[in-house]
Image (tube, helix red, strand yellow):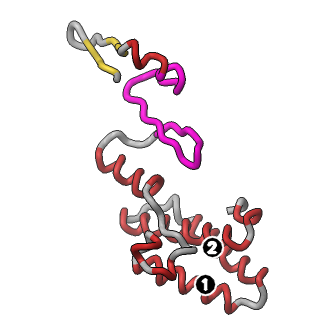
């Protein structure tokens, strides 16, 4: 769609085929490379690294099919959950059910979510960061499944 051409050394110009020009305006593309994605129907600008590892990590963490708490009892293939995620879901559901009343169970989920959220800015190995993000997504679903309005807090 876009091509960078240059005549001598560092000078270059951004060119676009006329058939794609309307897309540039429609999606407010002003430079090269521009990466856009859509999540839950909302258009977003990708701000991460352009190397393959950064793109793969972004897709895996943000766009790939995620573990479904609702479908977890069906097993790994149907739910998109790993065995590790299924065990974590079962553990958190047990804790929530053992709590005295629904409010206390929800408070427990929120407390765990808040605790893990504080860890997101810390330096850690990639696999630990991935597991942290997986748990946060699971907890958000667990909170959302019982109270959609309260899930907005997370």
Q: Which residue is mark 1?
A: 93
What residue is drawn where x is 41% and y is 76%?
76
Name the quadrant containing residue 145.
bottom right
- Residue 40 within the segment the image draws in magenta: yes
Q: CA distance from mark 1 to mark 2?
A: 8 Å
SS at mark 2? helix
Q: Is residue 67 above or below residue 18?
A: below
At horizontal 44% and vertical 80% (from top left) the residue drawn is: 75
Q: Residue furthest top?
A: 7
On the picture, is 103 further left or further right than 35?
A: right
Quadrant occupied by the C terminus: bottom right
Residue 34 drawn in magenta: yes
Question: Which quadrant: the N terminus?
Answer: top left
Dot 1 or dot 2: first in sequence order is 1
Q: Position of residue 7 (x, y in %)?
A: 22, 7
Q: Relative to residue 30, is residue 81 depicted above or below?
A: below
Which label sits on residue 142?
A: 2
- Judged left or right of residue 128, residue 150 is right
Task: Characterize the local packing of mark 2: few (<14), some (14-19) or many (20 or more) Cα atoms within 10 angstroms.
Answer: many
Q: Residue at x 51, y 82 (%)?
A: 73
All told, the count of numbered labels is 2
Residue nearest the viewer, comparing 76 with 11 = 76
Kindly check if marks 1 and 2 are in contact, taking CB atoms under 8 A apart as contact: yes
């Amino acid at each position: 769609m876009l091509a960078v051409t240059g005549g001598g050394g560092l000078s270059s110009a951004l060119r676009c085929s006329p058939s794609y020009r309307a897309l540039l305006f429609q999606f407010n593309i002003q430079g090269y490379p521009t990466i856009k994605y859509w999540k839950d129907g909302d258009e977003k600008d990708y701000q991460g690294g352009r190397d393959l590892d950064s793109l793969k990590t972004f897709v895996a963490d943000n766009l790939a099919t995620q573990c479904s708490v609702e479908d977890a009892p069906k097993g790994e293939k149907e739910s998109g959950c790993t065995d590790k995620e299924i065990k974590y879901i079962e553990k958190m559901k047990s804790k929530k059910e053992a709590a005295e009343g629904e409010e206390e169970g929800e408070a427990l989920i929120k407390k765990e979510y808040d605790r893990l959220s504080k860890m997101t800015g810390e330096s850690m190995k990639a696999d630990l960061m991935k597991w942290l993000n997986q748990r946060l997504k699971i907890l958000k679903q667990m909170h959302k499944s019982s109270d959609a309005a309260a899930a907005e807090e997370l």
